[in-house]
Image (cartoon, rainbow, N blue to C red):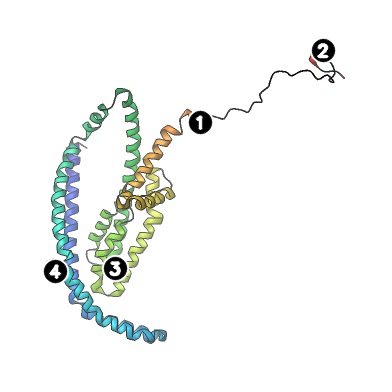
Amino acid sequence: MPRPVGIALLVATLLAVLSGVLPLMGTVLKEVQLLGRQLPTLTGNLETIAHGLVQRFPVLRGAQAQLDSWIQTLPNQLSAELGALLSPKGALVSGVVGAAGWIGRAFVTLIISVYMMAIYPSMGPFLLRLLPVRFQPLAQDISEHVSRAVGGYFRGQLTVAVIMGVIIGVGLSLLGLPSALAIGFLAALLNIVPYLGVILSVIPALLLALPFGLLKVAAVAALFVGANQLEGHVIAPRVVSQNTHLSSLAVLLSILFGVELFGLMGAVVAVPTVAALKSLLDAYYYRSPSYRAQPAAGRREEGPPGPADPGAPPPGPGGVAQG
């Protein structure tokens, strides 16, 4: 499609993402406030569950006093934590203020990105001209290999993100959780960072499930744990490995080493970096004469003839010894 149309579609998609995420933040805030008002009811439910467990399992009778004491002090502790969270100097308000600053920087980044997308076709030739002419063909060839490897990784990761968003959204909808599709969309958006989207999106899902009881919270947690295991061991290794031509083990090890060495940013850049290195090895090293050179056949060095053995028989015709 024409480049201006593509840029317009990308900007519209980004605005749609923001319009879907911002209402979700408001919904989570309302549910947190509702949770604070429902703490006495939740505490009564916990006491009922605890007494039922003690009656069913007498071995727990010795811990009943401690459990009752913990349940009675739980509302005060949660109320204090929620009060600190929602206070003008609390973490929530500070986070909102910080988010406003991030929105301003994101707007500037968006404007710069639009200009860079508009002039992208001329950026490559400009950078190529900075190199000496004799190096330009090699640089062009290397850039094409790296582009295919990195592009394959991001296409694969985008596919994984969409699959995980659908799994989370449909699963939460079947569980009857409010804003299920919005949380699924958030999980897909955060899943651009490998394996972390499911972990981060579980927080608002659990907050929204709390007013429905502990059984609903357990079901939501089980859904996210199952989705995380499915992504880590089945979906992500297979999809990303097919797009980057890396084995599933190579993808997992790349992410683990990236996180260990460079943290969150390492998880983002590890797999495309390894995919680019593999592409360059296939294109240059494995095809090089030095790699393909065969070992020379072993040859025994023959020295000059030594003095004749006085006890040896004299040579006959043709130089063959007689006797």
Residue 258 visible in the current orientation: yes
The residue positioned 25% from the left and 70% from the top of the image is 209
Graded by Cα atoms within 10 Å as few (under 14), some (14 to 19) or many (20 or more), the crowding at tag 2 reads few
Label 3 belongs to which residue?
175
The mark closer to the camera, 1 or 2, is 2
Q: Residues within 10 Å of mark 4 (few under 14, many from 20)?
A: few
Mark 3 or mark 4: name the one nearer the start of the chain.
Answer: 4
Q: Residue at x 22, y 33 (%)?
A: 123
Residue type (three-letter) at the residue carrying disc 1: Arg
Q: Is residue 118 left or right of residue 206?
A: left
**Closer to the camera: disc 1 or disc 3?**
1
Disc 2 + disc 3, Cβ < 8 Å: no
Q: Nearer the viewer, mark 4 or mark 1?
A: 4
Q: Nearer the viewer, mark 2 or mark 3?
A: 2
Q: Which mark is residue 317?
A: 2
**Gap between marks 1 and 2, in whole Å?**
48 Å
Residue 46 x, y percent position in the rendering = 29, 80
